[in-house]
Amino acid sequence: MHNRTKFYGQGKMDKNEQLIDAVLKSAKGQHPPDGRKQLTCTEAFELAKKYEAEIIEVGRICNQNNIRICKCQLGCFE
């Protein structure tokens, strides 16, 4: 799992760390049968927009943290 404790400057996280933190906090539940947490496609796009990141970066964060993106609208995540 990603280390969320790295801070820069005066106790503020950079945008990438903020995005990672937001993805980890937004992931919910346990998806049967593999027990992974989930993030909806809509939430992934909203986080990418909010943190001015490419949607692929949200996908990478999810992959690195074993989070499944569900209810995909456009086929970006499978």
Image (cartoon, helix red, strand yellow):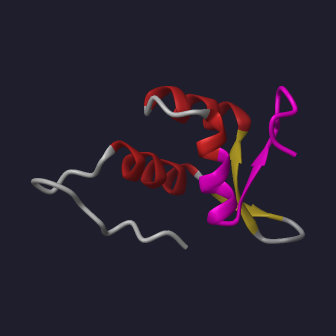
Task: Identify whether 11 is placed above or below 46.
Answer: below
- Give left or right: position of 19 versus 36: left
Q: With 47 as the anchor, is 7 left or right in this view? A: left
Q: Residue at x 69, y 66 (%)?
A: 66
Residue at the image position 13 percent from the left and 54 percent from the top: 9
Is 45 or 39 nearer to us in this picture? Answer: 45
Q: Position of residue 10 (x, y in %)?
A: 9, 54
Task: Report if residue 72 lies within the magenta region.
Answer: yes
Q: Position of residue 68 (x, y in %)?
A: 75, 55
Q: Looking at the image, which is closer to me, 40 or 16?
A: 16
Q: Which segment is the magenta one?
A: 59-78
Q: Residue at x 63, y 37 (%)?
A: 44
Residue 5 versus residue 78 in the image, above or below: below
Q: Which quadrant of the figure has residue 62? A: bottom right
Q: Position of residue 1 (x, y in %)?
A: 55, 73
**75 left or right of 68 in image:** right
Please, is residue 64 above or below residue 69 in the view? below
Q: Residue furthest left?
A: 10
Quarter of the image where one finds residue 75: top right
Q: Position of residue 46 (x, y in %)?
A: 56, 29
Number of marks present in the image shown: 0
Residue 35 in which image quadrant: bottom right
Q: Is residue 57 magenta?
A: no
